[in-house]
Amino acid sequence: MKILSLHVYPVKSLAGIQVSLFGMDDFGPKGDRRWMIVDADRNFITQRAFPELAKVSVSFVENGVSVHIPGEGNFTLKATDEETRVLVWRDWVMAQVGESVANQALSRFCGKDVCFVYMPDSSFRRVDAGRVSEYRRVGFADGFPLLITNLASLEELNGHLDVPVDMRRFRPNIVVEGSAPWEEDHWRKLEVGGLQFDIVKPCSRCVLTTVDPDTGVKDPGLQPLRTLSSYRRTADGVIFGQNAIHESPGVIHVDDSVTVIESE
């Protein structure tokens, strides 16, 4: 097995960036989901309620992260000194409010008062203690630093669909090729490019998988989630992919080897 592709998501629920490598720090992939969008109540918003966010593209620039908002233009995200408590799922976290010019542009695009917020190094959001006993941190990702998916599982799923979907629907960080379909259900520890990763939780999927990443439109037939739920439903939810944590900092690259060193 080897890494087929790598992806980072600088802003939670905006378009991702496919990269040839990424380094990992305490949060996970460097720069991954350190930014998020919140409403006037400081509650996080995503493509679940605003599928059009898929059309807001993101790029790394010399001084940080830039977003392209359709009809509005390009904006480099910059954190201000203003701090606020924001809610992501059940976690209240201290964050820094982004500059108003980008916030106003995104508010016009969404038709709702929203703003960008940034998680600084001084803020700490803990990975689910019920799954990971170590005192580990995560950014604004749903719950864990990394999501690993298997190309063969996507191909098997597509065999059940009238219209195939690509892996972007599932927003992985690491896509693996060379494994059998759904073999990832049994992985517990991987070695990837010489680094070790612990598989800590199957990833439960939601309506976000029904959003076309190119058009920002939800599939009227709720595909591929409807088909996936017909045969991949478990006690953990409708499963596609595995959440993971890394055991140490380091760098991984596309084409790095992937070895299962512990399975159930």
Image (cartoon, rainbow, N blue to C red):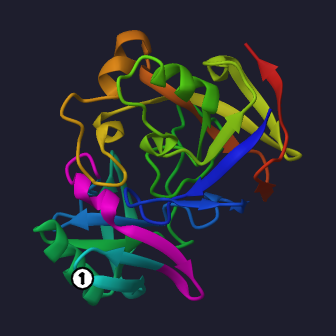
Q: Secondary structure at mark 1?
A: loop
Residue 123 appears left or right of 30: left
Q: Picture coordinates of residue 163 (x, y %)?
A: 36, 30
Q: Residue at x 54, y 20 (%)?
A: 156
Q: Residue at x 38, y 61 (%)?
A: 14
| Vertical placement of residue 239 versus 31, above or below | above
**Residue 20 position by quadrant:** bottom right
In this figure, which residue is indicated by the disc labeled 1? 72
| Residue 36 belongs to the span the image colors magenta | no
Q: Picture coordinates of residue 234 (x, y %)?
A: 43, 13
- Image quadrant occupied by the N terminus: top right
Q: Nearer the viewer, residue 59 or 194?
A: 59
Specify the farthest residue to the front.
Answer: 162
| Vertical placement of residue 45 versus 11, above or below | above
Q: What segment carries the magenta color?
A: 47-65
Q: Picture coordinates of residue 64 (x, y %)?
A: 54, 82
Q: In the image, what residue type sits under mark 1?
A: Glu
| Vertical placement of residue 233 versus 103, above or below | above
Specify the farthest residue to the left.
Answer: 111
Q: Nearer the viewer, residue 180 or 208?
A: 180
Instruction: Work out whether residue 48 can be spotted.
Output: yes
Residue 218 appears left or right of 80: left
